[in-house]
Structures are given as structure tokens and as C-alpha cells.
């Protein structure tokens, strides 16, 4: 049950604020009035609207059309990527510049009719474009009416210029033969023949897979489509988007002619043979292992004499001997990398493990 709050304004007058609770139990204001009787009628009327199912907040109708479209309607409207791309252009070009600054509750059918006239005169839009813009505006107003932001569909009953339906042009067999003969290669000819036989859209035709064709039953399954996005604001930044369903949102199967199935089978077999990697021969692998690596002296012109990084000093005699033995083995490995195994190998003296720089001079022949 609602109630009235009395308060004194800055001018010293007594004001009455009407309060009620919405469907979620939150306090809402039905307005501020000069008398308590008007305030009581306001919260009673608000509760009657709640009982009748009108649970929308009247303040939401005070927002502009641009704010509602950009913040609520368009981000949560479930449409295809290409449709969203077209909606973005039409909204920014024709709808929001004229109606975006108006409040939602102020948009009336007369404003929509005036807007349609401006599209014809001021913008010079053609009837198909005007029809698309009217469809977008009707979708916005329908959603606002369902969300109880407005209680009037301003676009209902507003007419747009008629859009004549043009007949489709069908080429003759002679024209198809000339087009078929002018194609670049056999792959493109097979692509066109498949399109003529199946009647697929280009997005469906270019996304066919080997698994979609059953050569035994001659059945072709259409299960995906690719679309091209031209706008800069592409999802995930990709120019082409693959959808796992065709345009009519359901898979379909169709039967192909025998001669076309044989051509497709031969094309698949040739493509699989061309894409199969050739394994290397055994003697090629052995030969690649026998290629000698260049020594350090051949690569640098001299043996690099770099003092090894200081390691932790051993704490016991046994550990000290293991440390010297490992250090001597590292010097021998370095010498073998420089000269290779054989007569050129140098036998390091025991004192080489105590002076790494001296060991480098011994290996280079500069130490007697």
C-alpha cells in the first residue's frame, strides 16, 4: 500500500510526494503534488496499473530514442552479423539523425509519417531503402512496447512508398555455354556446374566439404555457409564468417546427377593425391646425418678463449675431485669440437683444471 511524504520546499511551500512499491518491492515515486489528495490518487493509480499488468517504470519513457537504441536495444538484439552491419549503416544514416533526439513517449504516428516524407525529399532515399528503415524503426518501437517503455506503437499504420518486384533474368543455354567456355580452369567450371545443378547460394557452395557428399546415394548435404563482412567493426576482426547453418537455419539434402557426382569424385581423388606429402627416402635421411658440422675455428677464425663462469666451490675433497674431473671433461669436449677427434686432439695437463685461461692458451698452441 502506498503513502504520501510531506516536505517543505526551499520557497517555504508544503509539497506532497506520492510513494508506492513496484513488483520487486522497491519504493517508487508517482510524482510530487501540491495537495495530499492529488498525491494519494497518484499512488492509487500506480498500484492499479501494477494490478493491470502495467509494471513498467514511467521514467524509462523519458529517455531519447538514441539512448535506448545504443544502450539497450541494439546491443541485445539477436540478429545475423550481416544484418547487424546493414542496421548500423541505416540507423546512423537515416533513423537516428532525425528521430534520435526525441523522447520515447513523445514519438507519435505523425512524427513517423513526417520522417518518411523527409527520407524521400531531403535525403533522396529510394523506396527499398525507406522500407528497410521503416522495418528497423518498427522493430525498435515493438520492443519498447513489449518492455512497457511506451504504451503506443507510433509506426503502426504508417505507409511507405511501394517497392515494385522485378522479375529475375534467366540466361539461355547458349549464354551459359559461352560463360562456361570463358572460365579459367576446370575447377571453376566444375564449381559453376555444381551451382547450376544444385541451385546453392555462393556462400553455401564455397563451404562444401568432402564429407557433405555421399557418392553412393548421390546426396549432397548443405550444413554451413560463409558470409563476407564489409564494415570496420567486424566481430573478432575477421572478414569472412562461417556459420554452422544455412540461411534458412536448417540443414537440407538434395540429389545430384550421375555425371556431376563422377566429376566431383574424380576432383576429390585428384585433390587428395596432390595434398598427400611424399615421405623422404631412407638413404636421404642417412646422408643428411653425415654432413659434417663446421668447427669453432672455421666459424670464428680462432678458438674462443673465454673463462668459464665461476661455479660454487666444493666443500669436501671428494667433491673437489669430481669438480676437477668434470671441468677437465668440458675442456676436452671443447677441444674436440674445435679440431675433431683424432691426432689433433690435445691432452690437457693436470694444471689446466686450475687455470682455465691457461688451458685455452694450451689448446691454441701458445703455451709451452
Image (cartoon, rainbow, N blue to C red):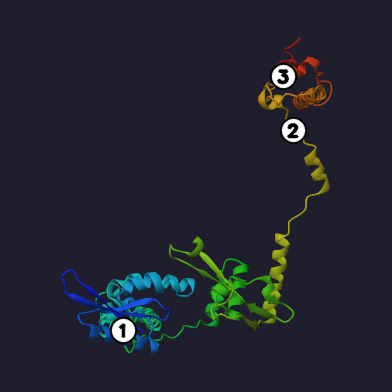
Label 2 element class: loop
**Which mark is nearer the camera, 1 or 3?**
1
Label 3 element class: helix
How crowded is the residue under tag 3: few (<14 C-alpha within 10 Å), some, or many (20+)?
some
Task: Quickly name the residue at label 1.
Answer: 43
How crowded is the residue under tag 1: few (<14 C-alpha within 10 Å), some, or many (20+)?
many
Q: Earlier in the sequence, mark 1 or mark 3?
A: 1
Q: CA distance from mark 2 to mark 1?
A: 93 Å
- Residue 28's x, y, as percent? 34, 77
**Which mark is nearer the camera, 2 or 1?**
1
Q: Does residue 116 appear left or right of residue 265 in this picture?
A: left
User: Which quadrant of the rendered structure holds the C terminus?
Assistant: top right
Task: Quickly name the residue at label 3.
Answer: 356
Could you say which quadrant of the image residue 362 lies in? Answer: top right
- Residue 182's x, y, as percent? 55, 70
Label 1 element class: helix
Residue 142's disc is none
* Residue at the extreme left: 11
Q: CA distance from mark 3 to mark 2?
A: 26 Å
276 and 117: which is toward the camera: 117
Q: Does residue 84 appear left or right of residue 157 in this picture?
A: right
46 and 218: which is toward the camera: 46
- Residue 76's x, y, as percent? 45, 73
Dot 2 and dot 1 residues touching (CB under 8 Å): no
Q: Does residue 21 appear left or right of residue 119 in this picture?
A: right
Residue 293's disc is 2
Dot 1 and dot 3 residues touching (CB under 8 Å): no
Dot 3 and dot 2 residues touching (CB under 8 Å): no
User: Which quadrant of the rendered structure holds the N terminus?
Assistant: bottom left
Q: Earlier in the sequence, mark 2 or mark 1?
A: 1
Amino acid at each position: 500500500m502506498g503513502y504520501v511524504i510531506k516536505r517543505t520546499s526551499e520557497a517555504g511551500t508544503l509539497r506532497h510526494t506520492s510513494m508506492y512499491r513496484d513488483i520487486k518491492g522497491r519504493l517508487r515515486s508517482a510524482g510530487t503534488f501540491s495537495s495530499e489528495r492529488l498525491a494519494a490518487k497518484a499512488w492509487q493509480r500506480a498500484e492499479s496499473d501494477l494490478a493491470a499488468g502495467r509494471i513498467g517504470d514511467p521514467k524509462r519513457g523519458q529517455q531519447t530514442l538514441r539512448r535506448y537504441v545504443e544502450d539497450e536495444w541494439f546491443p541485445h538484439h539477436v540478429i545475423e552479423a550481416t544484418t547487424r552491419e546493414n542496421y548500423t549503416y541505416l540507423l546512423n544514416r537515416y533513423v537516428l539523425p532525425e528521430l534520435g533526439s526525441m523522447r520515447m513517449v513523445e514519438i507519435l504516428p505523425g512524427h513517423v509519417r513526417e520522417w518518411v516524407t523527409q527520407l524521400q525529399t531531403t535525403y533522396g532515399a529510394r523506396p527499398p531503402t525507406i522500407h528497410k528503415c521503416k522495418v528497423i524503426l518498427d522493430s525498435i518501437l515493438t520492443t519498447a512496447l513489449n518492455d512497457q517503455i511506451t504504451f503506443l506503437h507510433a509506426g503502426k499504420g504508417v505507409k511507405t512508398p511501394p517497392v515494385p518486384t522485378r522479375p529475375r533474368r534467366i540466361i539461355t543455354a547458349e549464354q551459359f555455354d559461352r560463360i562456361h567456355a570463358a572460365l579459367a580452369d576446370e575447377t571453376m567450371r566444375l564449381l559453376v556446374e555444381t551451382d547450376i545443378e544444385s541451385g546453392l547460394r555462393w556462400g553455401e557452395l564455397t563451404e562444401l566439404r568432402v564429407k557433405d557428399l555421399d557418392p553412393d546415394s548421390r546426396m549432397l548435404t548443405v550444413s554451413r555457409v560463409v558470409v563476407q563482412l564489409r564494415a570496420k567493426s567486424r566481430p573478432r576482426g575477421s572478414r569472412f564468417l562461417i556459420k554452422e547453418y544455412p540461411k534458412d537455419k536448417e540443414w537440407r539434402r538434395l540429389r545430384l546427377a550421375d555425371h556431376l557426382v563422377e566429376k566431383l569424385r574424380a576432383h576429390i581423388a585428384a585433390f587428395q593425391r596432390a595434398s598427400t606429402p611424399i615421405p623422404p627416402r631412407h638413404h636421404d635421411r642417412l646422408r643428411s646425418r653425415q654432413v659434417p658440422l663446421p668447427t669453432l675455428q672455421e666459424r670464428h677464425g680462432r678458438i674462443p678463449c673465454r673463462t668459464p663462469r665461476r661455479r660454487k666451490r666444493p666443500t669436501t675433497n671428494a667433491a673437489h675431485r669430481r669438480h676437477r674431473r668434470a671441468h677437465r671433461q668440458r675442456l676436452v669436449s671443447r677441444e674436440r669440437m674445435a679440431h675433431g677427434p683424432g691426432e689433433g686432439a690435445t691432452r690437457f695437463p693436470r694444471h689446466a683444471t686450475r687455470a682455465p685461461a691457461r688451458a685455452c692458451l694450451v689448446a691454441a698452441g701458445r703455451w709451452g
